[in-house]
Amino acid sequence: MTQTIAPRVRTLVLLLLAACGLLLTTAGPASAHAALTGSDPQQGVVVDKAPDQVSLTFSEKVALSSDSLRVLDPKGKAVQQGKPSEVSGTTYAVKLHSGLPDGTYTVTYQVVSADSHPVAGAFTFSIGAPSTTSVSVSGETAGGGVVGWLYGFGRYMSYAGFIVLVGGAAFVLGCWQRGAGVRPMQRLVVGGWLTLTAATLLLLLLRGSYTSSGKVGDIFDLDLLGNVLQTKSGAALVSRLLLLAAAALFISVLFGAYDKREDEEKRDLTFGLAIGGTVVAAGLAASWAMAEHASVGLQTGIAMPVDVLHLLAVAGWLGGLTALLVALYRSEVPVESAAVRRFSQVAFGSVVALVATGVYQSWRQLGSWSAFTGTRYGQLLLVKIGLVALLVGIAFISRRWTGQLADTVVQRGKRAQQKERVPDKERVAANASGSGSGSGSGKSKGAGGSKRAAQLARQQAAMDTARQKRTRDADPNRFGLRRSVLAEAGVAVVLLAVTTVLTQTEPGRTEEDAKAATAASSSSSAGSGAVTLDMPFDTGGTDGKGVVTVDFDPARVGGNEMHLYVQRSNGRAFDIPEVKVALTLEAKKIGPLAVTPDRIATGHWSASNVQIPMAGDWKVAVTVRTSDIDQTTVSKNAQIG
C-alpha cells in the first residue's frame, strides 16, 4: 500500500492543476459586480445639440480613476475635459468640450465595483446625425488577458493556502495532538502558510494592472501599487499579510514548544493556542469578507460575519480532510481511531455550518428561484451544490469506515515488535561488548564497535518501522478509509476551483436588478416603451373597410419589433392578401424605407429588427390590399427615439 503513495499524490496534484486550469481559463474576464443601468445621453440615441457632459449610472457605487470615463469623437480623439466626478449616489459624470461637431461619439468606461471587481464597457451616441467612427468598442473588457488569468490563479491559491493552513492546524490541535511531532504534518501546515503568503503578495502586485490597463508591464508600477494600497481591497490584502505574521508565530509554537511538552503541560497551552489560532483564522477569513461580495448589498452587517463563519467551516472540513489524508498516507506514526472519530465530529459540525451559511448566502446573492437557471452565478451555484452533495455522500462512506476502524491490529503489531526487539537488543549489546573487549586494548577497536552498534540500531529501527507499516496497512478498515478520504480530497479540489470562479462572477440578484433597471431606462426613453398607431382604411371595393394597427417596440433608434394587425369594422381579424409599410423622416429627407412584414396569422403581420437610423417625427405609411385590384395607402406620424 505504501508503494502507491507517490502515484496517488501525483494524481491528486494533477487533478488540482487540471481543475484549476479548466475553470480559470474558461471563466474569461472577471464578470463585473456593478452593472451600468443608465446613461445620459443614452446608448444609440441621436441628440439635436452637443451635451455639456456625459453621465453614467451604475447598480452600486464604484471607484473612479482619472481616466475611468472617456468620450471619443469619430476619429478616436478624446473630447472629455477634467476628471470624472460623482454627481449623486451611483451616478458619475465627465465634462465635454464645447462646440462638438455632429457625428457618432463613443463613451468608454472602466471602474471598480464596491466588491473589488473591475467593470468595463462602451456605447455610442450621435450628435445631429449618425456617422462612421474609427473607434472599436468590441474589446472593452476588464480583468482579462494574462494578468486576469494570473489574478484568478492567485485567488485560487490563496483560498487553498488558507484552507490547508487553518484546517491542518485545527486538525493537529483539536483531533490529533501527536501530529505536532510528525514531519509531514508540519510540512503541510507550513506549506499552507507559504502558499497563502505568496498568493497574497502576488495579488497585491497584480491588483493595479488587473483593475486598470491589464498590461503585464504595469505589474511592478509603484504608482499603481500606491493607488492600490489606498483602496479597500489593498487594505484587506495588507491586513492579511500582517495576520500571516501572527500565524507564523502560532505555527512555530504549535510545532515547537507545544510538541515538546508533556501531556499534562499541554492542556493550558492547548487552550491558549486554540484561542489565539481562532482569532487569527477569523481575521484571515475577514480579509475576504471585508472587501468582496459580503461587504456590499443587502444586510452587510449580517453577511460579513456569516461569510467569515462560512470560510472557517470550509477550512475546518476540507483543510482537516487534507490533513487526515496526509496523516493516513505519509505519516509513520499511525493515526488512532479516536483522532479520526474526533475529526468526523468536527467535519459534521462544519458541514452543518456550511449548509446554514450557504443557504443564507444563496438567498442574498440570487434573490429569486429564476436566478438559479437564468444567471451564470446561479448556474455555477448549482454546480457547487452538486459537488457539495457528492462530497457529503463520500464523507458518509468515510464515517462508516471510521466507525469500523479499530486499533487492535496496530496494538497487536506493537506487542509483537516488543517481543522481537528483546533478542535483537541483546544481540546488539553482545556485538557491541564483544567488539569493545575482544582486543583487550586499543581505543580504535572500541570506537569501531560503537559504530557497529549504532549501525545495527539504525537497521533495527528501519525494520521496526517497516513492520509497523505492514501491520498498520493490514487493517482493511484503515485501507477503506484511505480510499474514501482520497476520493473526498479529489472532489474538494474541483469544488474549490468552482468556488473561486463563483467569487469572480456577478451575483444573480445584481444581474437581474441591472436588467430590470436597463429595461426601465429604455422604456422611459421611449415614453411607454412602444408606439401604437391606429389607421382606418377603405380600399373602395366590396368589404374593403377596416382598421390597421401598427406597433413599434421599443420605438427608439436602432432595432425595433414591428407588429401589424388588420381588423374589420366589427373587430374581427381581417384576412387580406398583402400589406406593406414605408417609413419616411421628411425633416431629414430620409426614406421612404420599405418594410415587408411576414404573415404570422390571420390579420397579424410582423417584422423583426426594423432599423430606425435616427430620432424624429417619422411618417408611417401602410399599404393595404384587400383583393387583386383593391388597395389603399394610409399614413400617420409617430415620434420615434
Image (spheres, grey):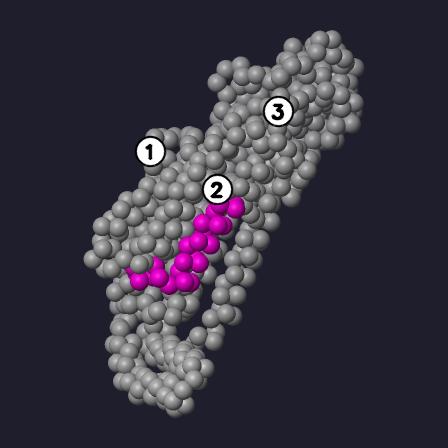
Q: Is residue 587 visible?
A: yes
Residue at left offset 59%, top offset 38%: 206
C-alpha separation, residue under disc 3 versus residue under disc 2: 24 Å
Quick one: label 2, few (<14), some, or many (20+) residues within 10 Å? some
Marking on residue 302: 1
C-alpha separation, residue under disc 2 versus residue under disc 1: 18 Å
C-alpha separation, residue under disc 1 versus residue under disc 3: 32 Å
Q: Is residue 177 magenta?
A: yes
Residue 266, percent from left and from top: 25, 55
Q: Amino acid at mark 3?
A: Ser
Under circle 1, the secondary element is helix
Please count the marks in the image.
Answer: 3
Quadrant of the image occupied by residue 580? top right
Q: Which residue is mark 3?
A: 68
Extent of the magenta region: 175-199
Residue located farthest toward the left when viewing the structure as drawn: 264
Residue at left offset 56%, top offset 58%: 18
